Amino acid sequence: MKKQFTPQDVWKFSYLSWPALSADGQYTAVTVKKPDTGGVCQPRVRVLEARMGRVVYESPAGVREMQPRFTQDGRLYLLSDASGAYQVWQISLENGERIQKTSLRHGVNHYDARMGVIAFEATLWPEEIDDGTAFHEMTAEEKSAWEKELDSRPYVAEDLTYKMDEWFGMRKGEKPVIGLCDAKGQRLLTQFKDTEGVYPALSPDGEALAFFAYPHGGVKGRTAELMICRDDGKPAAQLTGDVMYTPSQAPVFSPDGKSVWALAYQQYENGYSQTAVRLDVATGKLAFVPDLTEETVCEGVNEMVAGRTENGENQSCLAVLANKLLFLGGFQGKTRLYAVSLDTPKKIEIYNDAFEDITGFCVNGRGDAAVLAGSFAAPADLYVNGKQLTDEHAWLSEYEMPITEEIHIPSRDGQAELRYFFTHPIGVEGPAPVVLDIKGGPDTMYAHAYWHEFHALAAAGFGVIHGNPRGSAGFGRAFCAGGVCWKDEPMNDLIDMCLDAIQRGWADEKRLGVTGGSYGGYMTLKLIGKTKYFAAAAGQRVFANPGTSYGTGDVGWVSAEGEVPPHFSMLQYLTDRARGSNVSRVDQIDTPLLLLHGYKDYRCTFEQAEQMFIAMKERRPQVPLRLVMFPKENHALTRTGNMNSQVRHLQEIVDWMGLYLKGKKEQHE
Amino acid sequence: MNKRLMTMDDCCGMERLNGGDWHAGKGLVCWASNRTGGVMVKRLATGAVTRYTAGGKGEGYARFSPDGTQVSFLSSLPGKGRQVCVADLNTGETRVVTVLSGAAMEPIWHPDGRHILFSSSQETADRQEISSDAPVVIEDFHYKVDGAGFIRPDGHVQLFLADLVTGKTKQLTYGEADWMHHAISPDGRYIAAAGNVNRPKEDSIGFDLFLMDLQSDAPAFRQISHELVMVSYPNPVRPVFMPSGQAVVMAVLDPEADPSFGYPPAALFSFPVDGGEPQRLFRADAGCYQCVQFPYNAFCGNGLDKIHLDPDTGDIYFVSGWQGQANLYKLSPGSLRAQPVRVGSHVIHGLSRIQQGRVMIAQGCTDRPEAYILMELDKPKEGETLVQSGENIMEGCEIAPTEDFFFTTLDGESRVHGFVTHPARREAGKKYPAIVYIHGGPHPFYTYGFTAEFQALAARGYAVLWCNPRGSSGYGSVHQNFARAMDGSAYTDILQFVDEALRRFAWIDEGRLAVTGGSYGGYMTNWIASHAHRFQAYITQRSVASDLIGYASSDMQGSSRQFASFEEFMVDALRKSPVSYAENIDKPFLILHGEDDLRCPVEGAHQLFTAVKDTHPDLPVRLVIFPHTPHDQPREAEMLKRYYREMYDWLEKYL
C-alpha cells in the first residue's frame, strides 16, 4: 500500500544544483542541499567518478560547501565555511588535502578560478575596505559583537534603487566588491574597490577578468554593465552599451579568451527575448549577437520555469566551446539544452533530446556533459553523458504519484494556442474538486517538472490545473507582446482551461478553487473580483493595490520611463493606479479568501495583503477570511524560504481548499 | 554665572522620573529615575536616601504600602520580563512578587497591605512556546499594536491580585477582552476597573466601568457604566472611590461633546456602585474646560495619578489643561463648579494620594524639568520640592528663554497660542535661523513644559517656533475641532504663526527657516513642503504620507464605510494624502522613521521617499529608518544620538 504525499513530506527532499565536470571527464561534482532541523537548507558538495558514479568526496560533517569547480589543470575548488564564513578552498582528490585560499571578512559570494588565479565577489562594508580589515576573518566572539552593533545601525537611503526583496529590504552600506587572489596574495581591484561588482569570470589564461557592475545612480541604479579589466583593475575596456544585461550569472569567456559572452535582453519588433551577447575582449565591441530565438525550436535563453522543486544556484545557462554555443532554453513546456554552431549560425539544434526538464548543466572541452534533469515524476538528478549518477528521489517511489496530462486548446479569440497541464487527483474519480494554480511572473513557464505543491494537492484529492496563459514565456514573443498580461486575455485563457477541464468531466464546476503567488496572486484576486467561478481562493504574496505598491515595493518608477513630464501629478498617477485595481473590486467578492504573505517581502509588500484583508473585513464581513503572516520570509518564501514556513504555507492552502471545496479540513498525522 | 550650552548628550541623557509616592505618616518620599536606576526612598526628616533595586531595568511606578513599611515597583528583569517587586524598608530586602509571562502594569496596594492589584498581558497557561519566527494568524481587526507588535490571539490585558503572604497570584479576569485602570475601595472590598469586553473589536479605545465585589463567592465584574466611554487612550485615568465607597469617580469622554469635532474632552462623572444613574460632577466652563489633559511636550507625571480624593473633606482634586497650562483643580461635594487651586504657566500632570491636608504633585515649566512638590492644600501657591529631575542641566546649562503670544486666526474663528524659544546666548543685532516644530496628534497641545529637544536646538543657535494650531485641545471645543486640523485651517494657522513670529522678533532670519514635526506633525511637514514655498529645509518624522496605506496598515485602521464603493474611498484618501503632492516638494527633504512603527506605517516613508526622489532626481532627499523603533523617536540613548545627529547635520547643511 503506497503512502500519500503530504506537506510534511516536503522535508524529505534534497536539492541538486551547480553541476561541474573535470576537463578530462573523469570527475563530476554537484551541490546537494537538504534542510537542517531548523528548516534552513544547508549545501554540501559531492564529487563522483563520472563514469561509474562512485563517490570520491563529500563535504565533512557540519561543514557547508557549494559551487564546486574543476580547473583546466585538474584542481578542485569550492566554497566552504569550515573556517566560519564561506571562503575559496582547494581540495585534493588524491590525498584529501584542503587548502584555504581566501580569508574575506564576511566570506565569498561567488568566485572563478583559472591557472592559479582566483577572482572573488565578497560583501564588505566601506570602513572595512578602507581600514584593511577586509581580509581578517572574525572569531565567533568578534562576529557576535559585530552583529549586535550592526543590528542597531539605521538604514540610510539617498537613491531610488535602495532596497530589494533579494536583500530582504535595505542594506546598511555593505555591497559586493570584486577582488583577486593569487601568488601575490589577496587584494581588491584598485580601480573598482568602491564599485559594486558581482559574478567575476576569469579568462582561460587568468589574465583578464570580466564582471558585472552597477555604475549608474538614480533610477538606473540596478542597471548592470559588463566590465572587463586586467589584474590591477585598470580597464582594458569598459563594455557598456544599449544592452540590458541579466546579471544573475557570471559572464563566460570563449576558450581562446578573445570573446566574452553574457545573457542580455534583445528587443524585437514584436516583443523581447533573452539571448546571449558576445563581446570582443580587446576592443569591447559588440561582435556578434546570434539570433537564438527562431521560435519554432526555441525562444532564446530562458531559465524562467515556475513550479519546480529546486533550491540552489546553477553556474550558467551558457557554455562556449571552440565553435559552438550551448544554452538552456525553455520552450513550450520543456527546458532543453540547445546548441548552435558559431561558424554557421541560424540552425539551432536540441543538444540532448533525452531530457525534458534540464535545470543545470556543465560541459568540458571534450564535449562531455553533466546535466541536472528532472521530470513530472521527480526533481532533478545528475546525469553525465546520459548516465544517471545520483538517485536522490528514490524515496518518492513509496508514494502514490499523480498522473499529469498536457492539453492544447484554442484561446476564445482564436489568437493563440493554449497549453495547460492537468494533474489528476489521486484516488478520486472525476468530476473532482480542482484547484486552478496560477504561476507568478508572468513571463515564466510551467514545465514538465516535478512540483511538490501539485503532488500534495493531488494526494489530498484535488485535481490541479497548471497552465500557461498568454503572457507566459516559451511560446513565442507574440504570446506576451503588448503587455497582454495586465489585460483580460490571460484571465480568459485561465477560465477557458477550467471550462475545458469541466467539459472533460475532470473538474466539478461547483468545487473549483484558485490559488497563485505574486502575479498569480494578482490573478487570483482578479478572478474572484470579476467572476463567480470559484468556491475558494488562496492568494499568495498578492499584488492587490498599485496605489499603495508604488514606492513600497522594489520595482516601478515614474522616471524609469524617461524624464518626468513637467506637469506630472502624483495625485493623478496614484489615483489611476488605484482605480480598477483588485482591491477596488472588494465589494464583488464572495469567495472565501486565504491570504499568505511574508512580512519581509519587498517585491509585493505585506501591506498589499493588509489592503485586501482590511477592505474585506470591513466591507465583506460575512465572507470567510484568513491572513497568515510569515515574520521572516520574503517574496521567495515558497522557493527558498525556511522549510517550516514552506510546509506551513502549503498546509494552509491544502486545508483551505479542503474546508471550502470539500467541507472538511484534511487530516494529517 | 558661567553656564555651558546644552549638548546632544545632555538631551539624550535627560533624566526622567518614572513615578513616585509620598507617605505622610512615615514622612517618606520615593521616586524612580533613569539616572539612578532603582527606586530611591528619602526620609524627609533626616534627608537620608536609600536605593532599592530588583536588578532589572526601567524600574518605576513606585508606591508605598498603606503602612509605609514597604514600597512596590515594576522592574524589567532579564529573562523574566516586567514584574512586580516589593522592597521591605525595614529589612532592606527586595523580592520579585510575580512570575507572569506578560508585562505587569500599574501595581497598586490593597488597603490590607497584603495584596497588590495590577494588570498584565497574559497568555493562556496551556499555550506552547512560540518563537518570533512563527507565522501569525490574523482573522480580525486589531491584530497589531504599535510598541507591542503583532498581538497573538490570546494576548489580552487582564487583572491580577498578588498575595504577598502566600506568594501566589490570582487571575481575576479572563477572555477576549482587556482590563486596566483599576482602583480599590477604601474598605478593600471592591475593585473598579475599565474593561472593553462589551465593545466591538474595531473600537480599539472604548472602555466601560466595572465593579467587582471581592467578598462575593464567585467574584465577577459587573458593568456599572452604560454608554459612557471611560478615558483611556491617549491619557489614561484611574478611577477613585468616594470615601463612603458608594460611588466611583472616573473621567469619561464627554457625552455632550459634538462627535464631529473629534476626540471629546474628558468629563468627571460619579458612578454609584449599585449601577444607578451616573452624575456629572462639573460643567465645563472657561474656568475649567475638562478633566485631565493631553500635553505634547511636557515629560511630567509619569507613574502618578490624575484624580484623587481628600479622605478628610471629600474634595476631589484633579488636573486640567487650559491654554498651554496644566493646573490643579478641586471639586467640593455638592458643588458643580471646579475651583482652580494651583494655576500658572506650568504643567501639573500628576498627583499622589492626599494625606493630612497635603498632596505631592508633579510639576514642570519651560525653564525647569519635572519636580515632585509637596503642597499644602490650603497654601497652593507654595510648595516644598522633594525631588528635582535634571538638576545637572538646571545648574550647569544655559536655559534659553521662551516667549509666547496669541493671535487671532485669519478667518476670525479662534486664537492661536504660539511660543518662541530663543537661541541660547542670543546676541543683539544678529539674525538667527529658526525651526518650526509642529506637534503631533493633532489632538494634544504644546504646554509650558520643559522640552529638552528644543533646548538642544537652541543651544546650537536655532530659534524654535512652536504653536497650538486648530485641532489642538486645551483651548475649547471650537479650537480643537478635528476637521480644522485636516481642512487647511491648521496649515494656515502655522503659516500665520510664522508671520507673527517674524513680525515680533526681528532677529529671526526669514530666509533660513526649516520645518519639522512627528506623526501628525510629520503629516503637516509633508503638507507644508508640498504646498508652501517659503521654507528652506524639511525634516519629516514618523509621518503620515498616505492615508490609503494607513487605512490598512496602521494599528488604528481606517474606515471606508461612508463611501458607496471602495474606489471612491481610495480616490478620497489619496486626495487627502501629502504623498499625492510630492512633485511639489523641491527643498532638501529628510525622512526619519522607525522600522517597527505600526501607527504611521513605515511603508508610508518608503512611498514618500520614492515619490519625492522619483520626481526630483537631483534634490537632496534622504531616508533614514531606525531598527527596533516604534512610533516614537528611538529610546535607546546611542540610537537617539544618531537620530539627532541626522537632524542637526541636515539643518547645518541646508539651513
Image (cartoon, helix red, strand yellow):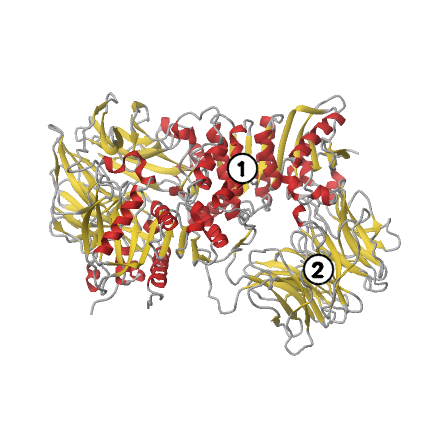
Q: Position of residue A231 (x, y in %)?
A: 29, 27
Residue name at image x 34 percent, y 40 percent: A486
Regarding residue B45, the answer to whether it shows in the image is: no
Count of picture labels = 2
From this viewpoint, which residue is outermost toward the bottom?
B217
Q: Amino acid at mark 2?
A: Arg
Q: Amino acid at mark 1?
A: Arg
Task: Kindly check if marks 2 and 1 are in contact, taking CB atoms under 8 A apart as contact.
Answer: no
From this viewpoint, which residue is outermost toward the right?
B378
Query: Which image quarter is the C terminus of chain B in?
Result: top right
Mark closer to the chain start, 2 or 1: 2
Q: Mark 1 falls on what kind of element?
A: helix
Q: Is residue A14 left or right of residue B413?
A: left
Image disc number at residue A224: none
Badge 2: chain ID: B
Report which residue position mark 1 lands on.
B575
Regarding residue B105, the answer to whether it shows in the image is: yes
Q: Could you classify mark 2 by the number of other residues whose Cα lies within 10 Å: few (under 14), some (14-19), or many (20 or more)?
A: many
Q: Position of residue B37 (x, y in %)?
A: 66, 53
Q: Nearer the viewer, residue A499 or A342?
A: A499
Q: Position of residue A396 (x, y in %)?
A: 21, 60
Q: Nearer the viewer, residue A549 or A264?
A: A549
Q: Could you classify mark 1 by the number of other residues whose Cα lies within 10 Å: few (under 14), some (14-19), or many (20 or more)?
A: some
Q: Nearer the viewer, mark 2 or mark 1?
A: 1
Query: Which image quarter is the N terminus of chain B in?
Result: top right
Q: Are marks 2 and 1 on the same chain?
A: yes
Q: Position of residue B214 (x, y in %)?
A: 68, 74
Q: Is residue B228 left or right of residue B522?
A: right
Badge 1: chain ID: B
Q: CA distance from mark 2 to mark 1?
A: 40 Å
Image disc number at residue B238: 2
Q: Is residue B365 left or right of residue A163?
A: right
